[in-house]
């Protein structure tokens, strides 16, 4: 006979106490009784709250699960309580497992937490009283699973992030999600939530999208979400409102969905993610297994995955993003930062306009765009206003808030000889003009005439020398690199580049501004193309060299599934062939022996082609006609393409560390994860190079 539930729970609670750590930020489960409006009875409302604001989401470590178990037991034991509800502190339900608090315990700790999560959450289904999950904001991983265990669910329409991202972290949904989701919304929806979205750079669902998929039974908006949800719960419990859910097709559609998921996983990971394959197995088996069998399979999957190098790499990457990103290595003392009360932007094109939108939304200070004439400046302002209106239309901003932000954005022209300028009073001016040194030097020389000596002059250059750009200025110490990645609103990384004469006050102000913009900031030494573009330049140069020598482009692209977020020649279509060529030409000038400039890429740029592939996913015939075949083609197999390119990256990464471009390999990995979309399960770049033995083979030592 198996272990009875009471004994199992006692054992799990005891083990949870043993493996728990003082490092865990405990999410308390605060129980209160609420009389349901319009219905007889009382709901035992449990609010998850770790005592921090929305910037520190609720998570479930061992002690947090124990706290939730205690609250559920109390509600179930109270005869006055007729139903249970679970919600979270403002804007947050929960962000899943507290990985940092259990990572050191090994497979045994992972198994204990997996089983305990199932045992605690299961009480919301099996406790004998109906339960409601009120999803009032962010709900990821276990945060969504706790609601999935409830009998009914409501969701806030503007909730920003719902999903099961575990596969991105080298795990599977392990607290019921892998069985509950396909049996709630069907296998196609499960593949989207568990496979496609996590492998698409961790894409998440909005509250509205979650409702459309069927993850919730009702959706409400506004500040009174909880009151509306409680009223709805009363209607359901009184029988005045019935909840209907569609039938799940368990026939051929299930097979088709799983097959499609396997195709997506193969294309995105090249078989390099054991978690994706295991998650698909769980979806597949959920069709005809019992709930208990499904939950047991999740427990086993988590324990098995906890022994893989991919999980070790994922936890390393998670730690980088959660901790190192919040305390940038080498950044000067924060107290040196000067306040930024007005921002100027030189240029009003698309990049400048994206910057203006981000700056005004995050800093909420006056932002002025300038260009060669008023018409261009006004066009940039109009772009910002239009984007703000779109946010308003989507319910992500209020009318008053939108009006205030619009009023902060203006446009103008710097006119030589005028006593005043649009930049009067600006503390921070960033240029986003053409990537040409002479143009940028001229811009800063002109701006310097109109701003105070302590105004920071920031450049969004992606490759040019900050030191050279500042050399002829009266105050070169206030020039700093402030390199964003496209699209500005989406990509987390901001490279902050220190020129030879950049002073600590300027640098501190740049880091403080980056933090206010909610970007991941990394300190970079002034060097050609900085971090991401230098590594991508070596990457693209190497694949260009291999393709020019005779290996077909599709073969080259096939070599990097599971390494890069997309095949290299597909990436060209995203960044633009001309930008990629410019980056490699810049790097070739600095390091001609290592950075190859592809003649075929140059021909593609000269022909003004937007990329190598057409809309049908095949090589564009016009591009194919431009590609010159070598007299003696060298056709490499996929594995050799991969090894040769990764060896080049290992060489470049070691050189960058030796040159002091960044403080440590962790910064290279953090940059490649947040700026280039490299995967968590590889740990970015250097962990992958170590794991495959390439680091030691090429450089004589590992990075870690």
Image (tube, helix red, strand yellow):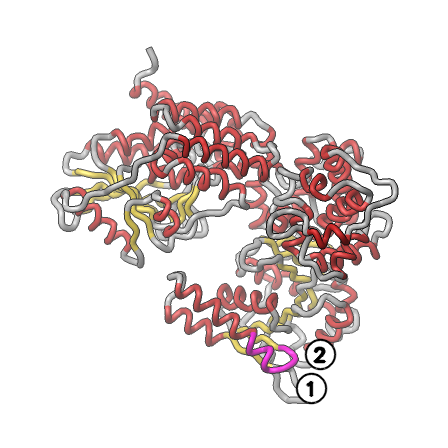
Label 2 vs 1, first from the N-terminus: 1
Nearer to me, 509 or 608: 608
- List x then y, in percent, for residue 628: 81, 50
Q: Residues within 10 Å of mark 1 (few under 14, many from 20)?
A: few
Residue 53 visible to the viewer: no
Q: Which residues are magenta?
A: 371-379
- List x then y, in percent, for residue 305: 53, 27
Nearer to me, 514 or 280: 280
The residue drawn where x is 46% and y is 23% is: 300
- Say which quadrant the C terminus sits in: top right
Instruction: Identify the residue position indicated by label 1 in the image.
Output: 416
SS at badge 2: helix
Is 426 displayed left or right of 71 in the figure?
right
The residue drawn where x is 85% and y is 45% is: 630
Residue at the bottom extreme, as displayed: 418
Does the magenta portion include 372?
A: yes
The residue drawn where x is 35% and y is 43% is: 215
- List x then y, in percent, for residue 201: 55, 46
């Amino acid at each position: 006979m198996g272990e009875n539930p009471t004994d199992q729970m006692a054992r799990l609670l005891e083990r949870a106490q043993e493996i728990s750590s003082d490092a865990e930020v405990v999410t308390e489960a605060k129980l209160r009784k609420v009389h349901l409006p319009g219905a007889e009875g009382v709901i035992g409302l449990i609010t998850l709250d770790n005592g921090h604001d929305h910037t520190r989401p609720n998570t479930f470590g061992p002690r947090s699960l124990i706290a939730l178990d205690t609250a559920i037991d109390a509600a179930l034991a109270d005869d006055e309580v007729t139903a249970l509800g679970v919600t979270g502190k403002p804007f947050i339900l929960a962000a899943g497992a507290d990985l940092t608090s259990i990572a050191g315990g090994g497979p045994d700790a992972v198994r204990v937490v997996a089983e305990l999560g199932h045992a605690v959450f299961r009480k919301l289904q099996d406790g004998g009283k109906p339960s409601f999950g009120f999803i009032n904001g962010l709900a990821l991983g276990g945060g969504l699973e706790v609601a999935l265990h409830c009998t009914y669910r409501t969701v806030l329409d503007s909730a920003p992030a719902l999903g099961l991202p575990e596969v991105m972290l080298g795990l599977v949904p392990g607290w019921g999600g892998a069985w509950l989701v396909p049996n709630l919304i069907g296998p196609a929806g499960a593949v989207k939530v568990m496979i496609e979205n996590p492998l698409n750079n961790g894409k998440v669902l909005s509250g509205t999208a979650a409702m459309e998929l069927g993850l919730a039974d009702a959706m409400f908006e506004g500040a009174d979400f909880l009151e509306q949800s409680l009223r709805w719960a009363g209607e359901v419990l009184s029988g005045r409102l019935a909840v209907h859910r569609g039938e799940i097709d368990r026939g051929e559609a299930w097979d088709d969905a799983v097959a499609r998921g396997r195709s997506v996983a193969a294309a995105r990971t090249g078989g390099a993610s054991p978690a994706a394959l295991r998650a698909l197995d769980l979806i597949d088996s959920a069709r005809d297994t019992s709930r208990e069998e499904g939950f047991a399979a999740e427990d086993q999957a988590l324990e098995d995955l906890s022994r893989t190098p991919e999980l070790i790499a994922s936890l390393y990457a998670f730690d980088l993003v959660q901790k190192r990103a919040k305390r940038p290595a080498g950044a000067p003392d924060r107290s040196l930062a000067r306040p930024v009360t007005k921002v100027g932007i030189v240029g009003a094109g698309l990049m400048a306009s994206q910057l203006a939108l981000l700056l005004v939304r995050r800093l909420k200070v006056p932002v002025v765009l300038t260009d060669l004439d008023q018409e261009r400046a006004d066009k940039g302002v109009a772009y910002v206003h239009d984007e703000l209106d779109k946010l308003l239309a989507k319910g992500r901003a209020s009318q008053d808030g939108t009006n205030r932000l619009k009023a902060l954005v203006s446009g103008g022209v710097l006119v030589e000889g005028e006593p005043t300028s649009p930049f009067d009073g600006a503390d921070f001016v960033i240029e986003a003009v053409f990537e040409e040194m002479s143009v940028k030097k001229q811009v800063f020389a002109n701006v310097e005439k109109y701003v105070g000596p302590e105004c920071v002059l920031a450049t969004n250059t992606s490759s040019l020398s900050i030191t050279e750009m500042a050399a002829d200025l009266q105050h070169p110490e206030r020039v700093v690199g402030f390199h964003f990645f496209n699209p500005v609103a989406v990509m987390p990384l901001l490279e902050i580049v220190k020129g030879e004469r950049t002073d600590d006050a300027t640098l501190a102000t740049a880091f403080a501004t980056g933090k206010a913009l909610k970007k991941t900031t990394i300190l970079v030494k002034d060097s050609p193309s900085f971090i991401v573009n230098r590594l991508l330049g070596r990457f693209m140069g190497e694949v260009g060299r291999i393709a020019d020598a005779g290996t077909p482009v599709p073969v080259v692209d096939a070599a990097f599934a599971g390494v890069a977020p997309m095949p290299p020649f597909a990436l060209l279509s995203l960044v633009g062939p001309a930008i990629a060529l410019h980056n490699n030409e810049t790097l070739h000038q600095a390091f001609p022996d290592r950075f190859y400039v592809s003649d075929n890429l140059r021909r593609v740029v000269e022909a003004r082609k937007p990329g190598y592939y057409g809309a049908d996913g095949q090589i564009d015939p016009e591009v194919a006609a431009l590609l010159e075949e070598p007299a003696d083609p060298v056709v490499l197999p996929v594995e050799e393409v991969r090894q040769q390119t990764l060896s080049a990256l290992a060489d470049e990464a070691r050189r960058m560390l030796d040159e002091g471009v960044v403080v440590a390999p962790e910064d290279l990995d953090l940059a490649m994860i947040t700026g280039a979309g490299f995967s968590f399960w590889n740990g970015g770049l250097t962990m992958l190079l170590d794991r495959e033995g390439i680091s030691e083979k090429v450089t004589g030592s590992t990075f870690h």
